[in-house]
Image: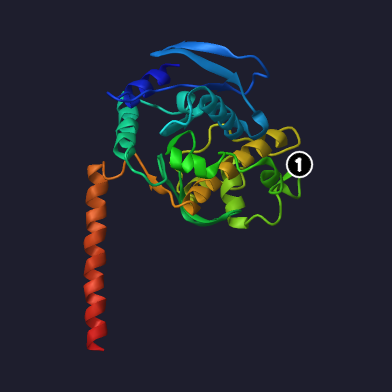
Amino acid sequence: MEVLRKFRAALDGKDAQVSLVIVDNAKTDGDERYSGEGFVDEPVVAGDNSNREFSGWDQGARTLVARRGEPDIWVFTNDTVASHHGWSDQRAARFGAGLRRLENHLGPWLFGEVTHFPHSMITPLGPSIRFVPTYCFAMNHVLHQGLGELSPGNALLDSLVHDHFEPAHRIFRDHVDPGYVDFVLAWLIADDSDPRRKSRFGWAFEWHNKRPLNAFTFDDLRMKARCCLSETMLSVRARKLGADFCSPYDAWSARDRIRKAAEYVQDKFWEKHLLRKLRQG
């Protein structure tokens, strides 16, 4: 729970009221209370594991709205943020500072560590070149109300993945774009026949829990594939609602500023060169 202290410190402001709901998808009934890391008597509720963390977050959101109404800003995390990411105080502070820059932005926005696909991907809801990973992300109430729920719905997800193991079909149904399927399955499945997948997709690291696909692992990998679908489609859904995508690292890194400035100068140089050729010819 130490990560909660870091987020509480990052999000606190003179006018901020920070509320917490902990959703335990392993619980089936009964509510508890949590006090600690600066929080007092916050609810711990049984979740909805039908779409893992996404349906769990929706359950938590309903709990918070019923208890205190719709907040201005929603922050969602899963257990990955505590167990598989190094969230230093500085990293959490950057996250909080980014949210404070956005708090008065009236349009819909989605905030997180924006990640680019290696190339344009055709998701089941349309093309995408980048997405916001959902181990830790935020949005304002405008976007949350527009989305309705974070999960795209079990009916849609079930139409995209098989419901039982068939080696010839793997996980995704045939109508899902092959390039998108290749990207997701390379992340999920341990496959020694594709040793270059990390460099092929430009990943700095691979998923810690990848495993071979077989009859014993199918159900878990199928559910994880549904989460990957939910994650990337959340960004597509947000974009269709006109959301701005923002990152804690926007114009923050000196190296990135230098790189962007060099690219801008290069583009302007070529723009002038091509315009000159057009005028001459």
Quadrant of the image for the C terminus? bottom left
Q: Is residue 38 above or below residue 19?
A: above
Q: Residue sitting at 53 percent across and 49 percent down?
A: 237
Q: Closest to the observer: 51 or 42? A: 42
Quadrant of the image for the N terminus? top left
Q: Residue furthest bottom?
A: 281
Residue 217, horizontal then vertical, whole percent:
70, 34
Which quadrant would residue 36 be assigned to in this image? Answer: top left
Q: Closest to the observer: 151 or 251? A: 151
**Left or right of residue 43: residue 9:** left
Q: Amino acid at mark 1?
A: Asp
Q: Closest to the observer: 177 or 183? A: 177
SS for callout 1: strand
Residue 209, horizontal then vertical, whole percent:
58, 32
**Left or right of residue 57: residue 71:** left
Query: Can residue 212 be seen?
Result: no
Q: Residue sitting at 67 percent across and 44 percent down?
A: 157
Residue 18, horizontal then vertical, whole percent:
39, 23
**Left or right of residue 59: residue 135:** left
Residue 243, horizontal then vertical, whole percent:
43, 49
Residue position marked by numbered label 1 in the rendering: 163
Q: Residue sitting at 60 percent across and 14 percent down?
A: 31
Q: Residue sitting at 53 percent across and 16 percent down?
A: 43
Q: Is residue 245 above or below residue 122?
A: above
Color style of the picture: rainbow
Query: Can residue 277 be seen?
Result: yes
